[in-house]
Image (cartoon, helix red, strand yellow):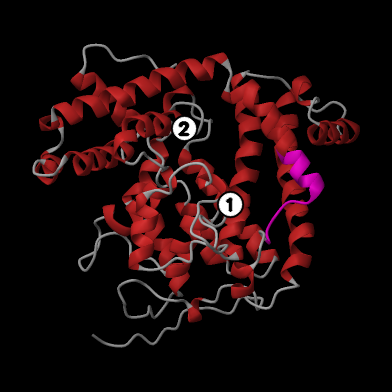
Amino acid sequence: MTTSPFLPRNDRPRAPYACDPKHSRGRLLAEPLSATRTEFQRDRDRILHSSAFRRLKHKTQVFVYHEGDHYRTRLTHTLEVAQIARSLARTLELDEDLAEALALAHDLGHPPFGHAGEDALHVCMAPYGGFDHNAQALRIVTNLERRYAGFDGLNLTWETLEGLVKHNGPLVDQNGQGVGAYKNKPIPDEFLNYDRLQSLDLAKFASAEAQIAAIADDIAYNTHDIDDGLRAGLFTLADLERVPVLATILNDIKSQWPHLDVTRTIHELGRRLITWLIEDVLRESLPLLQSVQSCEDIRASRHSIIRFSKSGIKADQDLKAFLMPHMYRHGTVLRVREAAEGLVSDLFKILMEQPKHLPEEWFVRIKNLDEPAKARDIADYIAGMTDRYAILEHRRLFDVTPELR
């Protein structure tokens, strides 16, 4: 093999507290360096070209895939998160490629039908350790993707795996007790098993790039769920005036454009809300970042470094408080959600009882496994389904399939 004359471009401004791909902790299985890309660029590209990433195209965000061409899917949501993450990372002089890689990977573990599918699988898997979409994302990138000759998974860098697992904060305290989302429930075995193989410092915060991916997710779904809810007729612009930050933005739009049509008003509202939230994060986070010297200082911090201000936290809470009853708990959405949960539960039950219905390669893999291992593999199979494929499989296996509309 000849040596390439090219060198990866790595000349963007980077602050001392940024993750530097030249000083990555490396991959579980060592690989030769790329002649044209940094280690974090390679991670981003591996995620982008994965089968799990492509399947996001036909996975529900809130609305099932066939309800309209303009509603967000997991894929379009993910791309919006990636755009916001890059914008934040660029301004804060962090590594844009790592932030983008984590944004692109953050929803890889979601099953079909959004949180309805996740909740149904969690109930089905309760006797076998439950189901967690973040843990499933780790399974995908460390095991389930089968693309490379030398290893299973994507063999991502330590920094990307750390960010994927801990983007919402530490999983345990210094005594090994669960914190955050795992304060009152067991930490998924996937995290603990991988941590024994390659420690991810579960008691520490992740990098600023990972924290950016997490807050970009909040910004993206708050804003695009407002847009999708308006498009679906679940609420109106007048309803949004109950939310202070939205009322202020709408008043500004009306003052500047008193005769603007509804469609353009909705788009202008979304654009200005994203800008407001991004700028709030930047104003709050930049002084905090300037008080640290390295990415290790960020990991050792007692609180997140990338965050909203007090007014930003209030706006985020107000947006979520509005969307919960008006969208996520809207009667139409709940009706579809209930049907989707039943569909996923049906698939899990019949495949556990009659695994011969699995594709041949899956059936061969599980036929000699004990029940917990078989259940986990069946959960992997169902979690990998798109909405469309799950509906088609249900129609193949059952006489009656619910209409998800």
Task: Residue 251: give x, y in percent of width and height.
Answer: 87, 31
Q: Residues within 10 Å of mark 2 (few under 14, many from 20)?
A: some
Q: Judge by depth and name the residue closer to the eye, 71 or 387.
A: 387
**How many numbered marks does the figure carry?**
2
321 to 371, vertically: above or below: above
- Residue 272 visible in the current orientation: no
Secondary element type, mark 2: helix
Q: Which circle marks residue 214 in the picture?
A: 1
Sequence-first disc among 2 and 1: 2
Task: Residue 194: give x, y in percent of width and height.
Answer: 35, 61
The residue type indicated by label 1 comes to Ala
From this viewpoint, which residue is outermost toward the top? Answer: 400
Res 20 → quadrant: bottom right
Task: Residue 67: give x, y in percent of width and height.
Answer: 47, 22
Q: Residue at x 56, y 52 (%)?
A: 168
Tell me the magenta residue range.
305-316
Q: Is residue 378 left or right of residue 46?
A: left
Q: Is residue 328 left or right of residue 45?
A: right
Q: Residue at x 48, y 59 (%)?
A: 176
Q: Residue at x 35, y 48 (%)?
A: 52
The residue type indicated by label 2 comes to His
Q: Judge by depth and name the residue closer to the eye, 55 or 36.
A: 55
Task: Residue 311: give x, y in percent of width and height.
Answer: 81, 45
Q: Is residue 222 magenta?
A: no
**Quadrant of the drawing holding the C terminus:** top left
Q: Which circle marks residue 115 in the picture?
A: 2
Secondary element type, mark 1: helix
